[in-house]
Image (spheres, grey):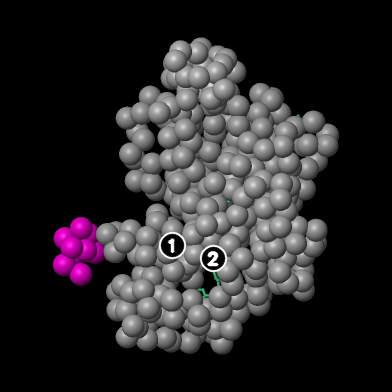
Amino acid sequence: NHLAVSGSSSFHESVGGKVPLGLRRRQLRVLVTGGAGFVGSHLVDRLVERGDSVIVVDNFFTGRKGNVAHHLQNPRFEVIRHDVVEPILLEVDQIYHLACPASPVHYKYNPIKTIISLLIGTLNMLGLAKRIGARFLLTSTSEVYGDPLQHPQVETYWGNVNPIGVRSCYDEGKRTAETLTMDYHRGANLEVRIARIFNTYGPRMCIDDGRVVSNFVAQALRKEPLTVYGDGKQTRSFQYVSDLVEGLMKLMEGEHIGPFNLGNPGEFTMLELAKVVQDTIDKEARIEFRPNTADDPHKRKPDISRAKELLGWEPKVPLHEGLPLMVTDFRKRIFGDQEESTE
Ligand code: NAD
Ligand code: UDP
Ligand code: UDP
């Protein structure tokens, strides 16, 4: 039941044929940088399903071809191995800019590369958007609030960020990416959108990326102890990936620049999260305490009033429903199909 027709010569053309007039939408060409990663690949699924032509640009640092392999035979899909730190010439209508390592383990691995990707990579994608008149959406992060002194975090809060710490390459990189985005909007009249994404989980997350949900799930499945850092009383709010993708698309299609918090306000301590993982996978799973990492934010919870009001968006999937969907995927990837059916 596609509302768009492939092979249209102009992507700004209305779609003709038998689709009722009121339902017609133009087919878009959409660039997703970082589209072979966790969030990007789920976004690509929805865009392709909607009938858009999708180009993925990814350097496969943390992404995998397998995440988008199911689209490779589709003539409206293309993947380009490319690092956004280098300029690129493409013609598209919309740019979702996700390319950037997202887990603390990955972004601290080469912090200089991380901040360069955020500065130069975002500059290049903004320059591209300016040249072709595309709408540009930046996937920023709740990390722009640092170790927040306001709780829950509202978009008007400016944050409490250490500029010289081990997380700064990511936090300050994203803050500068937001600045660049707003300066291109003000200076070059570019249409921009900014999403501040809170902790998101789901199928296709890297199994060993060190984030807490992927760690706990993989550990419980492998019968290893769940590693709780610090006293486990720090909090995060966990959003299922399909909710995020819907929010990103509503933001891109809507009239508001943002920034918008996109996250699930359901707040959990790490010990509570461990309990949910135990209940879902293995009630006998042990907990092992480890020293916490530097500059770890004590609490984090989005105020999503702005997104509710202006985008008509709110998350629908609570943790106890989303987690089993991720567990099914992790089980398959860790043990293979055979083991899964005997579990
Ligand atoms: P991910 O690591 O799965 O995806 C990032 C993708 O970007 C990968 O495919 C990677 O190979 C690619 N990439 C990295 N550097 C690149 C470069 N220089 N050039 C081209 N491609 C590059 O992470 P994710 O969770 O899917 O995150 C996607 C975006 O959302 C990131 O920008 C991240 O900062 C943001 N975000 C995610 C979360 C979350 O909880 N998942 C929270 C806040 C913000
Ligand atoms: N850029 C790109 N693709 C384009 C247009 C620009 O990668 O289609 C890059 C360009 O190489 C530059 C950056 O985007 O490094 C910013 O471009 P802009 O035109 O805004 O700045 P200028 O090139 O004038 O400094
Ligand atoms: N954490 C944990 N055990 C792990 C990995 C992380 O207790 O195996 C904690 C970490 O200290 C932080 C929280 O979980 O307080 C979320 O960490 P994550 O890396 O998932 O995301 P962040 O929100 O810090 O970017």
Give the main secondary structure, helix, strand or loop, of the magenta stretch.
helix
Q: Which residue corresponds to the image point at 32% horizontal and 30% vertical from the top-left? A: 73
Distance from the alpha carbon under mark 2 to that under mark 1? 10 Å
In the image, farthest residue toward the right: 187
Residue 57 versus residue 208 in the image, above or below: above
Question: Does 40 sit left or right of 182 as displayed?
Answer: left
Residue 238 marker = 2
Do the residues under discs 2 and 1 have CB atoms within 8 angstroms? yes
The residue under the point 60% across, 27% down is 93
Give the vertical position of 102 relative to 76 (above or below). Answer: below
Q: Nearer the viewer, residue 131 or 326?
A: 326
Query: Dot 1 surroundings within 10 Å: few (below 14), some, or many (20 or more)?
Result: some
**Highlighted magenta segment, given as a residue range:** 335-343
Residue drawn at (20%, 58%) of the image: 337
Foreground mark, 2 or 1, reads 1
In percent of width and height, residue 206 lies at 42, 59
Label 1 residue SS: helix
Tell me the amino acid under the disc marked 1: Gly
In the rendered view, tell whether residue 194 sits above or below residue 333.
above
Res 116 visible: no
Q: Please, what is the three-letter code of the amino acid marked with disc 2?
A: Phe
How many C-alpha atoms fall within 10 Å of the one at disc 2: few (<14), some, or many (≥20)? many
Q: In the image, residue 126 lies at what x, y percent?
A: 69, 36
Image-quarter location of ligand 3 = bottom right
Which residue is tagged 1? 322
